Amino acid sequence: MERPLKMDDSCTSKKTKTKRQTWSKPWDFVISSAGMCIGLGNIWRFPYLCFKYGGGAFLIPYILAVVVLAIPLTILEVSLGQSVQKGVIASWATIPIFKGISLASGVSMFHSNMSYPVILAWVFKYFVSSFTQNLPWMSCNNEWNTEHCIELFYGGNGTAIKTLNNFNEITPNTTNRSCATVSMSAAEEFWNYGILGVSRGLHDIGGLQGDLAIYLAVIWILGYLAIFQGIKWSAKVVYVTATLPVVLIIIVTIRGATLEGASLGIDYYLRPELSKLQNPEVWIGATSQVFYSYALCGAGLITLGSYNKYNQNFIRDSILIAFFNGFASFLCGFAVFSTLGSMAYFQNLTIQEVAQSGPGLVFIAYPQALALLPLPQFWNILFFLTLLLLGFDSQFVYMESFCALFMDINPRLRKCHKYSRQVFLAICCAGFCLLGMIFMTKGGVYVFEMFNMYGKAGWCLFFIAACEFIAIGWVYGADCHWKEINRMIGPRKIQPIVTVVWKYVGPILCLAMSIYYVTAHSPLSYGSYVYPVWAQVVCHLISTSSGIWIPLYVLYLLVTTKKPWSKLRRMETNNKRENLSDSFKEEKLEMM
C-alpha cells in the first residue's frame, strides 16, 4: 500500500514541497481498500451476527443496506478524498462547519485501534496452538475441560464418532466458571475456558492472562515495525493477503458442505424466516455490520482515496469493493453454518442451541472444520496465519489514518525532526497496547463487546453517516459536489440515484436508526449474561465520545467566527478544488 512516507526533515523547509504519492496502478486502490474492508469483520463478525439474527433473514437487510447505504457512502468518502488529495482533516475542512466529522472519525479510529488488535491476539493464540501434535480444541483431555465436554471427529471409514470426556481422569480448573449443564464441544470449551478463561461478568474482571498479554504486545510490536520501516511494499503484498483467505474459505466451505448434518446449518443460513424481518433489531444489526465491514465513517476510505490519481474511476471501484466484500461475507457465513449444522447433528441439538451467539462463534466453527481436513495442523496454521496477515492490512490502515489525523492537526510531529514521525508512532502503539490490556483479563471479553457493539459500531456510526450525507447533500450541495466529480471522471448515469440517497434516503434512515439504537435497542448481552444498567450507560458514552465532536465544533464555529454562512458552507472548498482541477488539466496538457 503506497503511503507518503518521506516528509520535510526540518521545520524551516517551508518552500520545499513534496509531491503527494499516488497509487502506481489503479487496481492498487481497489485491492488495498478490499484488503482493509475484507478482514475480520467478514470472517469473524458477520457469521455470528447472522447467527444471532436468524440466519437467512439477516441476509435480506444486509444486501439492501449494501446497495442503499454502503455504496453511495463509499462513493461520497472516496470522491471527497480524491478531489481534495489530502487526508481526512483537510478533506472535511473544505466544508468548514462540518470539520467536526474528521474529529469524530478520529475517535472512531481510536476505538478501532483499541479493540481490533484484541481479535488478532486471540488469532495469534490459535495460531501458536496449531503447532501442537494434538489440536487442543479437538480433545477433552485438557485442564480447562469439564465433564460435559464432547469430542467430535471422523473415523477412517467416514463415520462420525462422538465421545464424552471422562471427568474422573482430569480435574478442570472451574474457578469463576459457572458449571455447564448441557454438553459442549471441545472447540467451545477451548474458546471459553482455554482462550478467554471467561469470568462471570463485569463485576468479576479477574486478573491479567499472561499469554494473551504477550500476544497483544507482539501484535503491536510487529505492527509498529511494519509502519516504522514503511509499508510501500504492502500494495503488492495485499494482493496475496486479501485473496488467500478467500481461497481457504472456499476450501473450508467445500469441506463443511460435505459433513454429515451440514444441510441443517445450510438450510438455516439460506432459508429466511420472513417473520423475523418484523423485528427492527435485525435491520439495525445488518446495517451496523455493513458499516463495520466497509470501514465507513472512519478515516480509512478518505485516506486511501486521497492517493488516487485525480481522474481515477472511483465509482467503478466502489462497486467492485462492495462486490468483493459481500462475496467474502457470504462465503464465510456458508462455511460457518455448514459446520454448525454438523455439530448440531452429532450433539442432537438445534442450530440455536449448538453454540452461543457472540464473538467466539467463528473461533469455534472454523477450527472444528479445519481439524476434519487431512493434515489438520497444516490447514490451521495456514488459516490463522492468513487471518493475522489479513488483520494486519486493516490494522495498518487504522493506525496510519489515526496518526495521520494528528499529524495533519500538528505538522510539526513529522517535520521538526528526522525521527519525529517514528517517535510519535511508537508512543501511539505503546499507548494502545497498554490500554488494550484491559481486554486481556478474564472479564476482558465483556469489555471488548462494549467497544465492539458501541465503539466501532452502534448509533455513533449512524449519526456520523447522517452528518456526512447532510454535509455533502445539503450544506455543500450535492449538485456542486457532482460538478467536481464530473471534472474528475466525467458525467455518470448513476448521479440521480446517488443524489437522492445523499439528500434524502441516507440521512433519514441513518438518523432513524441512530434514534432507535439509543431509545429502543435491546440491552447488550454476552451469552446469558445481560449487562447491568451502569454498563449500558457506559456503552452509550463510548458512542457519544465520537459523535459529540460534530455538534460541538458547529457550536464552537458559530460562537467564535464572524464569517458569513456562505463561507462556512463551501467558500474555501471552491478555491481548493478548482485549483486541483486546474493543475490536473495543466498536467494533461504537459503530457500531450
Image (spheres, rainbow, N blue to C red):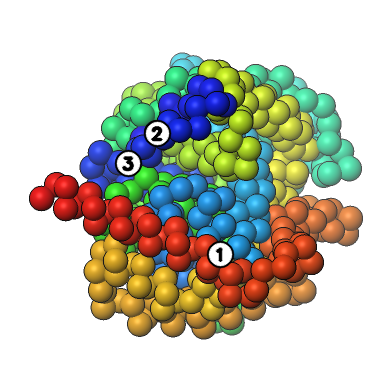
Residue ID at (47%, 70%): 69
Cα distance between the residues tagged 3 and 1: 24 Å
Q: Which residue does the numbered mark 1 point to in the structure image?
A: 95
The amino acid at mark 3 is Thr
In front: label 3 or label 1? 1
Badge 2 is on which residue?
18
Give x and y (percent) for residue 219.
56, 25
The answer to whether residue 477 of the structure is visible from this angle is: yes
Q: Residue beneath label 3, please?
A: 22
Residue 413 located left or right of residue 362: right
For marks 1 and 2, give the CA distance.
Answer: 25 Å
Query: What is the distance, in whole Å, between disc 2 and disc 3 at their CAs?
Result: 12 Å
Badge 1 or badge 2: first in the primary sequence:
2
Quarter holding residue 32 = top left
- Residue ID at (36%, 55%): 580
* Quadrant in the rendering for residue 399: top right
Residue at image point 89% right, 55% down? 534
Please tell me whether mark 3 sits on a helix, a strand or a loop: loop
Q: Nearer the viewer, residue 79 or 357?
A: 79
The answer to whether residue 128 is seen in the rendering is no
Which of the pair 552/359 is nearer the observer?
Answer: 552
Q: Three-letter amino acid code at disc 2? A: Thr
